[in-house]
Amino acid sequence: MSVWRCGRFELALDQPLVMAVVNVTPDSFSDGGTYEDPASAVAAGERFIAEGAAIVDVGGESTRPGACMVMPAEEIARVRPVVLRLAAEGVPISIDTRNAEVARACVEAGASIINDVSGFRDPAMVQIAAESDAGVVVMHMLGNPATMQRSPRYDDVVREVGGYLIAQATQLEAAGVARDRIAVDPGIGFGKTLAHNLELLRRLHEIEALGYPVVIGVSRKRFIGELTGVDVPAERLGGSIAAACWAAEHGAVVLRVHDVAPTVQALGVTATLAARD
Ligand code: HH2
């Protein structure tokens, strides 16, 4: 059985793991403002673990298309108290940040995973990964959040995203990050059209074949709105669960979700139905 080594945790990958989203932000696309004070963010993290999440992903900066940049001191002030408290309770925490100062402060506060939506492009982020024993999520994003949805273009989106992920993972390994600490994520919605997102999900086995655990975030995303005509992100639960189960059956082992209990239930039923002995 393979494991993903993340700081003091060894996360078994024999069944899909749920990574619960807790955005301590005023402006995230679907839960902005919900957990703005640390106590409500901590309570949400505790509830998500009780509902079956394996990891709590704490974020202090929205990366939705066109989102405002947040200064590192402000981002740290938002996330650090939440990381400190949940980590002290023994929860595997990932810190969702593109900023090296924030990553360092949160690893020191007890975070076990660095989830970088810009895929460790910043050498300072690579250095922090190398100096710590945290797990890492290398995600693909085209450009940056301000510009990524302006006519994204690829010749073959799966090949290009896969090539980027391998290059970034190789760079991390060369810097001293052990291979079994690295997971990859094709970055659904990050500089991709509906057609690109669908192509990545339909050919997810090609991303799995890169040889790293695959993380997927489809929860409440715009492509589900485009497929269903549902404009309000929080009302996209059915589509989000369908996409998470589909991804889990086609190579993803970590599912990043906002709605933990229903997703855990659906993943369990899907895995049982798919099991062959
Ligand atoms: N998606 C979002 C943020 N972080 N990290 C990974 N690894 N994969 C993803 O798909 C991913 C991610 C965007 O969702 P959310 O955090 O809900 O919104 P916002 O960026 O507006 O805070």
Image (cartoon, helix red, strand yellow):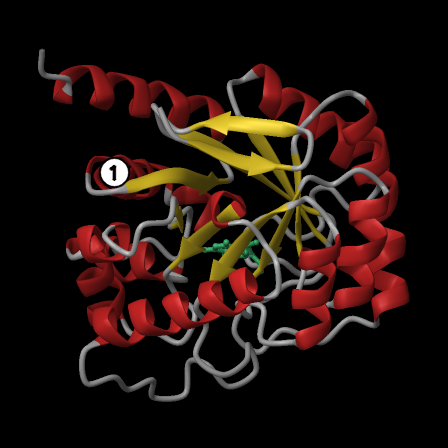
Q: How many marks?
A: 1
Q: Position of residue 155 (x, y in %)?
A: 19, 85
Q: Choose top left, top right, bottom left or bottom right for residue 229.
A: bottom left
Task: Identify the residue at the far left of this view.
Answer: 277
Mark 1 beta carbon near ligand 1 (under 8 Å): no
Q: Choose top left, top right, bottom left or bottom right for residue 120.
A: bottom right
For badge 1, the amino acid type reads Ala
For residue 136, side relative to residue 130 (left or right) = left
Q: Residue at x 75, y 36 (%)?
A: 41
Q: Does residue 71 show up?
A: yes
**Mark 1 Cα-neighbour bin, 10 Å: few <14, some 14–19, many ≥20:** some
Quarter holding the N terminus?
Answer: top left
Quarter holding the C terminus?
Answer: top left
For residue 73, side relative to residue 269 (left or right) = right
- Residue ID for mark 1: 242
Q: Does residue 232 show up?
A: no
Q: Position of residue 78 (x, y in %)?
A: 84, 52
Q: Residue at x 32, y 57 (%)?
A: 225
Q: Position of residue 215 (x, y in %)?
A: 41, 47
Task: Identify the residue at the far top of this view.
Answer: 277
Helix, strand or loop for disc 1: helix
> Is 240 drawn above or below residue 144 in the view shown?
above
